[in-house]
Amino acid sequence: MKIVVSVKLRPMPEAASALRDELHGCNEGANWVSWVAFEHFGLKVREYALRKLVYAGLRERGIKSAAAQQLIKKVTHAYTTLRANIRAGNFGKEGSKRRKKAESKPIVFRTDAAQAYDHRNMGWDIDAQAVAITTRMGRLKDIGFVCSPGALKTLAQYRKGEADLICRDGAWYLIAICDVPEPEVYEPEGFVGVDLGIANIATTSTGYQAAGRGLTRYRRRQLNLRRKLQKKGTQSARRRLKARRRKEARHVKNTNHVIAKTIVTEAERTSAGISLEDLKGILQRVRLRKPQRVTLHSWAFAQLGGFIVYKARRAGVPLVHVDPRYTSQICCECGHTDRRNRVDRGLFICRGCGVVAHADRNASRNIAARGETVWKAGRESRAPVTGPQV
């Protein structure tokens, strides 16, 4: 299982200047490589053919050999991703304005876009908490970094492959890849169903409920503050806006980490599996009034689901995805399905057996039952019967 560990670099001013020159130079080179690739191959870029065209030019720009190879790979992978998105319809139908725009010009990389490094042009000294990076200005040694004790332990044991150098708001980071072994998945004794929502971020069939009221108020407060600062338009207001960048995203991410850890820990403690809704494409399917769209599109359900999945894999907890349709309309006691069973957002009253329950709790129990069905279907033997037939 591959995870990433982020460490913050503490370079001296001269080293920071060299890193900035390296990052800007590499991305300028990537833009030139992208232009050459588009002129010669269109969107169907071939890495070997592209390397023969641009490698010498990159070396003339002062880019080291390993960085040049990484640049060529980065451009090739970017065009491969673009073609896949076009085939999947993510840029609209053929002939649409957005798709024409994507197909008509080369890919452009930001000045501060990430640059990959591997063992050929970067070295780690985990004990001393320092790295060495090869730049256009030479080899930078003993660049200190800081991270949490857990991250440092993971780096020491499982670091493998590339690391990405990024500059975010003037600070330097290395995003390292770690290949962590996965424990064997145990046979679950039942499933914990997880119903994801906005009013309640997550509700489990075992009773845990993460209310979303506080997060909604926080988002509303941040939105109003951004509007006031944008309306003011002074230099001080712009400075405050810049300082608050990504603050809301960090808060939401931390909240989702806490919720995911609580759910996985509970499932592991009770030797249960986790049953999640497959909500892929829900933002395209749901139609809401304009005042509700900001709330819906701020809903970080995919991030929370991803956190639950990777934490479950690290803990060896079984996890399945189930169809979420009608889970809020089916009675978890008798199975009666009626859209009128959902009286309002938080109340469920079955018109078949009369049971009264919290709507999200009822849905989570339906999700748990579906998870158990999916798990058993996956474990069912499909091998033909052998031996003499009676």
Image (spheres, helix red, strand yellow):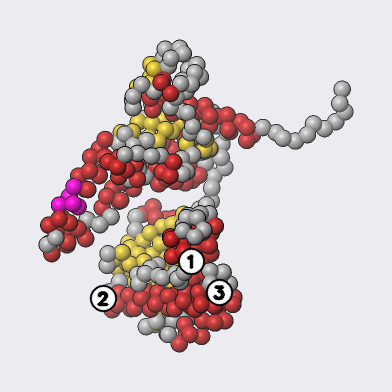
Q: Is residue 300 above or below residue 373?
A: below
Query: CA separation, marks 3 and 2?
Result: 41 Å
Residue found at x 22% / y 56%: 244
For the residues bearing labels 2 and 1, Cβ distance under 8 angstroms = no
Task: Determine which of the numbered discs, if any, sits on residue 361 in the image.
Answer: none
Q: What amino acid is found at the position of numbered circle 1 in the picture?
A: Glu
Residue nearest the viewer, comparing 65 with 47 = 47
Residue found at x 27% / y 74%: 12
Kindly report which numbered mark, 1 or 3, lies closer to the viewer in this rendering.
1
Please give left or right for residue 202 compared with residue 177 in the image. Answer: left
**How many residues crowd around disc 1 within 10 Å: few (fewer than 14), some, or many (20 or more)?**
some
> In the image, residue 252 lies at what x, y percent?
31, 46
Q: Is residue 1 above or below residue 213?
A: below
For marks 3 and 2 on the same chain, the one whose residue lies earlier in the sequence: 2
Q: Secondary structure at mark 3?
A: helix
Residue nearest the viewer, comparing 382 with 287 = 287
Q: Residues in magenta?
A: 224-228
Which image quarter holds the C terminus?
A: top right
> In the image, residue 98 lies at what x, y percent?
43, 60
Residue annotated with mark 1: 103
Please give left or right for residue 371 compared with residue 231 in the image. Answer: right
Residue annotated with mark 3: 41
For marks 1 and 3 on the same chain, the one whose residue lies earlier in the sequence: 3
Q: Secondary structure at mark 2?
A: helix
Q: What amino acid is found at the position of numbered circle 2 in the picture?
A: Pro
> In the image, residue 121 lies at what x, y percent?
46, 75
